[in-house]
Amino acid sequence: MIDSKIKNAIKNKSLESIPNECCGFVLTDDEIVFCENSSSNPTKEFYIKSEEFLKNIKKGIKLIFHSHPIGSEDFSIVDKIYHKQYNFPLLVYSVKNDKFNFLINNTELLKYENEDGDCLGFVKCYMEEKLNIKVNTFISKKNIDFMNYDKKNPSFENSEIEEIMEEIKCKPINQDQLANDDIVIFKKLNIFHMGIVFEKYIIHKTIRGINLTDQSFIKKEDYLKCYRYAG
């Protein structure tokens, strides 16, 4: 989760920079580096000089941020090109809507791929490698039919999942408590998914690869189970 102090600092700088977009880096130690917006059209876009990247990349760049003085928190085409070019997560703050948005490169999640190629195996790999939790057993795609889910009654109970979550020291939580690295079992287009929370997204694996689903796109009743590691 991005610290509230970092968000407040970016928000204040964004207000000071109006009508221009402010921009800069958050480093791996959470230091905030504000950079000059060198764009020829700074009211509508941002540009950070290459020397600023060279100076800060040795310290470790965690993400690039910028503001939208009059636009929404949605990413523009230019933003997406910029993000793809520099291959760093991108944070934007909308002054108009007083909201943040986050764009992450899916490729950095490929290290959590698994041989089974399913969302459940992805969660297992993620927990073992990122959270350093040893998961000896885990439900697989082959067991998905055993999940007791009635479409007419959107409740979700499954003793096998409960046992596994208890084994790996994950406790049930409410959907409104979700934070980074929490586990979510949810339904999307009548398909079961298990994913990991990251900022406003749920990271999950499909046959097409790693996906980021915006939490706001999931109906409240389609959040079936939520868990947090409590070890």
Image (cartoon, rainbow, N blue to C red):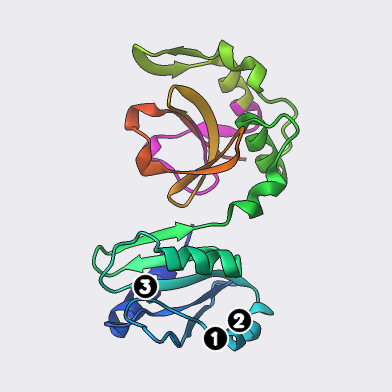
Categorize mark 1 by other alpha carbons within 10 Å: few (<14), some (14-19), many (20+): few
Per the image, label 3 sits on a secondary structure element best described as: strand
Q: Which residues are magenta?
A: 165-185
Residue 68 in the figure: left or right of residue 114: left
Q: Tag 3: residue type?
A: Ser
Report, in whole angstroms, how far the alpha carbon at label 1 lies from the one at label 3.
Answer: 17 Å
Question: Where does residue 50 sit, x and y in percent of width and height?
Answer: 59, 84
Question: Where does residue 222 sit, x and y in percent of width and height?
Answer: 38, 27
| Circle number at residue 67 | 3
Per the image, label 1 sits on a secondary structure element best described as: loop
Q: Tell me the quarter of the picture where residue 101 sits.
A: bottom left
Residue situated in front as seen by the camera: 218 or 163:
218
Q: Give me the residue at 63% from left, 16% from top.
A: 143
Tell me, yes or no, if residue 130 can be seen here.
Answer: no
Report, in whole angstroms, how far the alpha carbon at label 2 lies from the one at label 3.
Answer: 18 Å
Per the image, label 2 sits on a secondary structure element best described as: helix
Categorize mark 2 by other alpha carbons within 10 Å: few (<14), some (14-19), many (20+): some
Q: Nearer the viewer, mark 1 or mark 3?
A: 1
| Circle number at residue 53 | 2
Q: Tell me the quarter of the picture where residue 91 sits.
A: bottom left
Q: Give me the residue at 53% from left, 66% from top.
A: 83
Residue situated in front as seen by the camera: 149 or 90:
90
Write down the residue under mark 1. Answer: 49
Categorize mark 3 by other alpha carbons within 10 Å: few (<14), some (14-19), many (20+): many
Q: Tag 1: residue type?
A: Lys
Question: Where does residue 160 sit, x and y in percent of width and height?
Answer: 60, 16
Tell me, yes or no, if residue 119 can be seen here.
Answer: yes
**Badge 2 or badge 3: first in the primary sequence:** 2
